[in-house]
Image (cartoon, grey):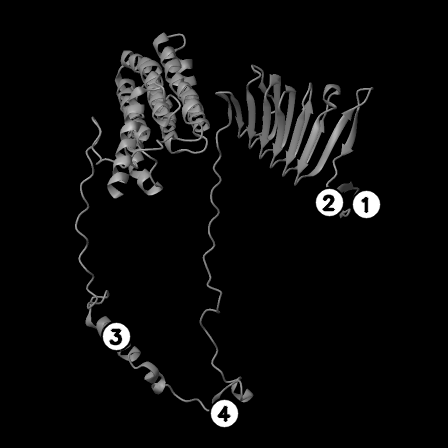
Amino acid sequence: MAELASLVQRLEVAVGRLESMSGPGGSGGASAGGAVSAYVEAFDVIVSGALAQYLSLSQKIGGDVQKHADMIKQAFSIQKQLLLKASSSQKPSDALMTPLLQPMSKMIQQVQAFREQNRTSPLFNHLSAVSESVPALGWVAMAPKPGPFVKEMQDAAMFYTNRVLKDYKEKDKVHVDWVKAYLSIWTELQNYIKQHHTTGLTWSKSGPVASAAAPSAPAGGCAPPPPPGPPPPPMDVSSSSGGGDGGADTRNALFASLNKGADITSGLKHVSDNEKTHKNPNLRGNAPVRTGPKPFTSAKPAAAPAPTRTQPPVLELEGKKWKVENQEGVEDLVISDTELKQVVYAYKCNKSTLQVKGKINSITVDNCKKLGLVFDDVVGIVEIINCRDVKVQVMGKIPTISINKTDGCHVYLSQDSLACEIVSAKSSEMNILVPNKDGEFTELPVPEQFKTVWDGKKLVTTSTEIAG
């Protein structure tokens, strides 16, 4: 029976290999072998398409960009080897997965290290775009959402690719094409993952459990680190750290006392009742005064307050996000060149006024004090978070305003935004001002106190008015 079972197992392995060689066009297209072959071939399409175009344009630019591109080419080669292994092997345990992913991890680190070593390069924005997004190749270890992870890494590159476009848009079209080609790599990789590895890297259902081969140094990379040196010599416990025989004598005396066991208390002095202060009140007045530090009051020197660091003010477009940060006492902040897909993020702005013109996606106001916000139209949401004494005025339409962890918020609605939903939590001093026919506003407070009762089936919560 054992020989028969072994023969059956060998036949199953042989059939699996034949199915993988037949590819998706064979009769077993839906089998594990056919599907595996399909996703390896689909990865080759990215390599021969978007990646090849990026490599070609990098060669035209030359210099550090070309060196970086050679590393990316090698990283994709390592990833393909991993995909080939996954197509013919079963998924290993987490402990065995780590050495499998190590070559990919080292290559990503090498790409990022090259950028750090060349900060003075005239093509630093190119290097930064690649360095910030190359962790996307780590999608093979991300589950259950590898696709969104790649998208996040691609967005991280856009800050620097926008700088490249700004610097070379009117100077050199090669750099503009380079940006498009590079970003298209990650776009196609997202589509590839969505089609073949939606919830994580797909492994074969048959075949041996995957194992890592002996690591080898990547071409053009650094040599492997030398083996660790010999362990330090054992500590000589017979010598004292103080450098004399006194420490050893004291330690030997201590060990000798401990070895007495229960007899260790034989040398203690007996105290009679008439010598105990808690039984003889007359002795309490003669007790020696304690001159040492009080118990549990180990005084610590007062730490000097950390100096407050003033961050530079920011008002710029980063990808699709308008960043407004660290503005202090500026009353004429204006964002006018807006698009529907853009968002605004205001952070740590004090005693300032921000006006947003046009129609945008959303606005977030975070950790601001005494900020005035005026905007036209928002198709998504306006969020007020961790703020104090802010005023918001709607000139056009807004579907939802969220107020969270904020003390003092006045919202001026327009006639077109009266259907707006106000969602609040952990906030106080909130007032909504509604326009009248004569152009004046009626101020209405948002409830802060609530009453909750059990009606026999569920909890019923209603707002209550604070008696004043």
Residue drawn at 26 percent across, 79 percent down = 256
Q: Is 368 on the left-hand or right-hand side of 253?
A: right
Q: Nearer the viewer, residue 6 or 61?
A: 6
Secondary structure at badge 4 equals helix
Q: Is 220 situated above or below 460? A: above
429 to 280, vertically: above or below: above
Does the image show residue 76? no
Q: Could you say which disc has been placed on residue 467 in the image?
A: 1
Q: Secondary structure at mark 3?
A: helix
What type is the residue that disc 1 sits on?
Answer: Ala
Residue marked by disc 2: 459
Decide: few, some or many residues near mark 4? Use Cα within 10 Å; few <14, some 14-19, many ≥20. few
Question: Of the residues tagged 4 and 2, which is closer to the observer?
Answer: 2
For the residue pair 335 and 137, the one nearer the viewer reads as: 137
Residue under label 4, please give it: 274
Q: Earlier in the sequence, mark 4 or mark 2?
A: 4
**Callout 4, which amino acid?**
Asn
Can you tell which mark lies on residue 250? 3
> Residue flagged by tag 3: what amino acid is it?
Thr
Front position among marks 2 and 1: 2
Rate crowding at label 1 as few (under 14), some (14 to 19) or many (20 or more) other CA atoms within 10 Å.
few
